[in-house]
Amino acid sequence: MRRAICIAAALAALSAPAAAAAPSAPLSHSGRWITDAKGRVVILHGVNMVYKRPPYDPLAAGFDGPDAAFLSRNGLDAVRLGIIYAGVEPRPGSYDDHYLAQIGRTLHTLTRHHVFSLLDFHQDLYSERFQGEGFPEWAIEDDGLPAEPKLGFPGNYLAMPALNRAFDHFWNNDSGPGGIGLQDRYANAWRHVAGRFGAEPYNLGYDIFNEPWPGTGWQTCANNVGCPVFDETKLTPFSRRVYKRIRSVDSRRLVWWEPNVLFNNGPQTHVGAIGSRAGMSFHVYCLQDGPKPSPQDDEQARTCEPFETLPFQNANAQSARTGDANLMTEFGATDDLGQIERVEKYADRYMAGWLYWHYCECADPTTSGSGGTQSVVDDARKAPGGSNVKRAKLEVLSRPYPQAVAGVPEGWSFDPAKERFELAYKTRRSGGGSFVFRADTQVFVPRLHYPHGYDVRVSGGDTLSLPGSTRLRIRTCTGRRRVTVTVVPGRGRFRADCRAPRTDPSLIHVRVRPRRVVAGALTRFRFRVSVRRGRPLRGALIRFAGRRLRTSRRGRAALTLRLGHSGRRRVLVSKRGYRRGRATVRVLRR
């Protein structure tokens, strides 16, 4: 029994570092970057799981615990989890909480495997009446036009007047049942959903409308500039309306808006800022497919490059303008491995996270990846293994990348031909402040690419994980401002140019006398600085009242000055390798 306990303890000790380094829930953002609870920049790789057929929940498609474990094991730590509005509000003002309970079961399954869920009100072609999915029948206002011609997805967008009229009425927030605006009903449904799932730690937030279609007059958006009138007068007010309803019940989770669907192919967006803790969810699709499956296709790459790079450039420009986070929440829907890998390369270049479309075929009625070409797993009702998994596609999707960065990324890249991964980042915290101890960088290193192990070279940091671990942990060395990491196939050799601290740096303790003084009185202040067990700290930097001084060998310093105004004055003491100490002096009026 004692031997078993010792073995268990040893295993726990080995597994603890990986758990400590994983992205810590809940997630927020700092400008364009998604951040975790420890302030690290988080890069997400994952998939979409949207079941568009009644009863509209992934459990009905067969998605369950083994699928969540499969995703986590392969470094896919986020899922865009589809919610169909027709399932949420089947009758005006009446919400189906049994349906939401089923969605909650899937969210909890993903949470158990540390996979984040982005809740997505998904629609394509507005509703089932128009050969799509999304809105309930009662929310369709199409002026009585017939649902013709039936060209399927995406043809109905271009050729079916009834579908475009339905979108027109929605963007105008025209009255539906009970005289209540269609958007108001929709926003209220979002409020109900957010009230139910707002406390879930692995809830990445709310993707409020999938691929907004401009409706009648969509042709004005088919250019590189986009359609400012629709974005500014229709899409922005709608996004703000939903944002406010969500914020009435959930002030913490990110609210993700989407640009109009033509953004996917290069046009700019003109959506304004909708509020704090917001993100932009965007998609990237090339209009030209290659052979299935294919290697890299030079001709296709030249044709597709503007369609595939402009959305990244426009998304980063939008984030710079509004301060929103951004995340590519769809791409792929194909067995063209060259195309998938090319978009991943662009995502790395522009430092964007991504979610592949789609996990399974799942009888999807509105996809460009028809006939099962979109899937990673052929049948979600079967175990994700063996012939049920498209291994070649999995190898493209499961690739090295930084899951959490203790700093601000400068760039990363992966060369599949050489199996070489590189990462560089500044060690300052995005948005300011400092990191807590053990807020380490974590890089996912898949065994699919390194079956015999890998070598690591680090500058500015030190490796903490075991050789061959799929979660490579890097800790910044004291005083270093930049870290670079290189991973290549090998046998487990780790090289670093410095050694990072293994134990929590000591907190600096500060004593200052006197702690109360009268404004304007000439006063001699005496400082005593120590660390663990009262040991004096030599050479610590004291900052007080605009002055700087260093402690002596005995950890002491003195300063004579007048403090001119009443209030509080902070004493800050720092030294490399130690946690900053603070004290306060109170200045009284004469």
Image (spheres, rainbow, N blue to C red):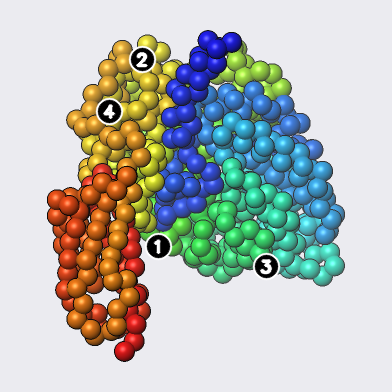
Comparing 307 with 95, the one in front is 95
Residue 55 position within the rendered picture, expressed as x and y whole percent measured from the top left: 79, 38
**Amino acid marked by disc 3:** Asn
Query: Residue 172 bears which disc, if any?
Result: 3
Q: How far apart are marks 1 and 3 (CA)?
A: 26 Å
Residue 106 position within the rendered picture, expressed as x and y whole percent measured from the top left: 69, 35
Q: How far apart are marks 3 and 2 (CA)?
A: 58 Å
- What residue do we see at 33% from left, 49% from top? 507
Task: Answer whether labels 4 and 1 touch (C-beta < 8 Å).
Answer: no
Q: Can residue 153 be seen in this view?
A: no
Dot 1 crowding, Cα within 10 Å, few <14, some 14–19, many 20+ = few
Secondary element at image label 1: helix
Q: Which of marks 1 and 3 is nearer the N terminus?
A: 3
Task: Using the image, determine if residue 295 lies above or below residue 565.
Answer: above
Residue that numbered label 1 is attached to: 321
Secondary element at image label 3: loop
Q: Which of marks 3 and 2 is in front?
A: 2
Task: Using the image, determine if residue 426 lies above or below residue 69.
Answer: below
Residue that numbered label 4 is attached to: 486
Task: Answer whether labels 4 and 3 touch (C-beta < 8 Å).
Answer: no
Q: Is residue 537 visible?
A: yes
Task: Answer whether labels 1 and 2 touch (C-beta < 8 Å).
Answer: no
Q: Residue furthest bottom?
A: 590
Secondary element at image label 2: loop
- Residue 363 is left or right of residue 490, and the answer is right
Residue that numbered label 2 is attached to: 453
Residue 385 position within the rendered picture, expressed as x and y whole percent measured from the top left: 60, 15
Q: Earlier in the sequence, mark 1 or mark 2?
A: 1
- What residue do we see at 38% from left, 18% from top? 468
